[in-house]
Image (cartoon, grey):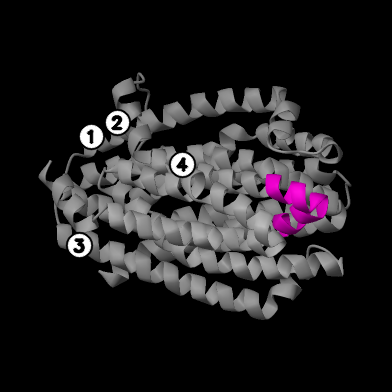
Amino acid sequence: MFKKFLKYSIPSASAMFVSSLYTVIDGIFVGRGVGDLGLAAVAIAMPATIVLFGIATMFAVGGGALVSKNFGAKDKERAVYIFRQAFKSIIILSSIISFVFIVFSEYIVVLLGATENLKELSAEFLRYYSLFCIPSLLGITLNGFIRNDGGPKLAMISTIAGTVVNILLDYIFIFPLNMGVRGAAIATGLGQVATIAIILPHFLKKKGQLTFGNVKLEMKVVKEIITIGFPSFFAEAAFSIIIFFYNIVLGIYMREEGIASYSIINYITTNIYMMLLGVSLGAQPLISYYFGARETKKMFTFYKFALIASVSVNLLFTLVCFIFGRNLIGLFTTDKELINIAYIGLNMTNLAYFFTGLNLSTSMYYQSIEMPKFSNLICAFRSFVFLPVILFLAAHYYGTNGIWASMIFSEILTFLAVNIVTNTKTNTKKAISV
């Protein structure tokens, strides 16, 4: 069982880590090629791009959980039908979002906290990023279904290939062609196009059980996919909300310097967040499959593996940042004061991710057993309930250090509250008995 867990979780976590590397390298290129204002401008637009990732993950996890459950229950026809419903839905939805974000990019970045100095650059990045909404959302969604169709290695390969393309184009567009943040956005989109080019043959040549086919949208099925997958969207939206609150508070207390330092922290910590997400996504097909097969013991075993893996991964990452943090930050900026501010913030933020990993794994477990209300509760605690209150109070009374420490207390309180309010063993018995 441990080998099976590694078979799914290692490719998933590796793919997420490599894909997040492009975010880091993108930040380095933007910081060096555009400057600190460029970093801050991308940071302002980041909540919107995270929401897009969340929408795609919602369909990937919600649809994937239902697909694996039906595979476990030996109902392949139903699994394929659910996949086709999700595929058609994401194409329609991404087309609408692309239009809205392109047309209203300036209004959106202002709502996200852009100052007058950042508005134009932030809007430019979001506008060009949104041109590639369809391939971006489709690539993430199809990757999720491939994992549930027994192809975690292919999902990893396609993600890595897209990342390599993105990095190469990033350099070309920002430096030789001097395209600024517009070039960074276009490079990201073309990287997703490369990912899809590798994914499509799996479905077109019928290498797995899932295949393309025309279906009439059935809102009952789409609703079921969204209901189960919504916590994944909520988790990303929660991350986006966290960034939004931080940008607002840092803008008040530290202006552009604070936003730029937080942007660097996010570029680096995106790696650990995506790896923790990858661990939970790797466990999801296995938990969903054995949920369909009604094998409770195996479900719990894979859940425990995910918890242990998330703590282990975060411990390694925290040590690396503590030892080499200043060097990593120095890749983004040469401003010594900015490096010092970001280094303190980075190491304090990493402590919070120990509990973030546990919360993400628990949230994914509840999605896998079709009890998304508890996953939504976790997300609500993390973003709406604890963080805003702690953040504003800590900023007022303890200044910059209070701002950096806010996420630690928010995640710990979420972890404690969830374990008080819910019980995984009791809820699993209820889910199995339905």
Rounded to the nearest whole Å, what is the CA distance between mark 3 and mark 2? 27 Å
Q: Are the residues tagged 4 and 1 within 8 Å (C-beta)?
A: no
Location of mark 2 (residue): 81
Front residue of 50/345: it is 345
- Give the residue type at disc 3: Lys
The earlier-in-sequence mark between 4 and 3 is 4
Q: Position of residue 220 (x, y in %)?
A: 29, 23
Q: Secondary structure at mark 3?
A: helix
| Amino acid on which disc 4 is placed | Phe
In the image, taking residue 301 as reference, residue 391 lies left or right, namely right
Q: Residue furthest bottom?
A: 323
The type of residue carrying mark 1 is: Glu
Residue at the spot of label 1? 77
Mark sitting earlier along the chain (3/2): 2
Q: Which residue in the protein does label 4 denote?
A: 234
Question: Mark 1, residues whose alpha carbon is within 10 Å: few (<14), some, or many (≥20)?
Answer: few
How packed mark 2 is, by other alpha carbons closer than 10 Å (few <14, some 14-19, many 20 or more), is some
Q: For the residues carrying marks 4 and 2, which lies nearer the camera in this image?
A: 4
Where does the magenta region start and end? 248-265
Q: Are there few (<14), some (14-19), or many (20+) residues within 10 Å of tag 4?
A: many
Question: How much space separates mark 4 and mark 2, taking CA atoms?
Answer: 25 Å
Among the two numbered marks 4 and 2 on one chain, the one whose residue lies closer to the N terminus: 2
Callout 3–callout 2 Cβ contact below 8 Å: no
Examine the rendered structure and indicate whether residue 419 appears above or below residue 228: below
Q: Secondary structure at mark 4?
A: helix
Q: Mark 3 = which residue? A: 298
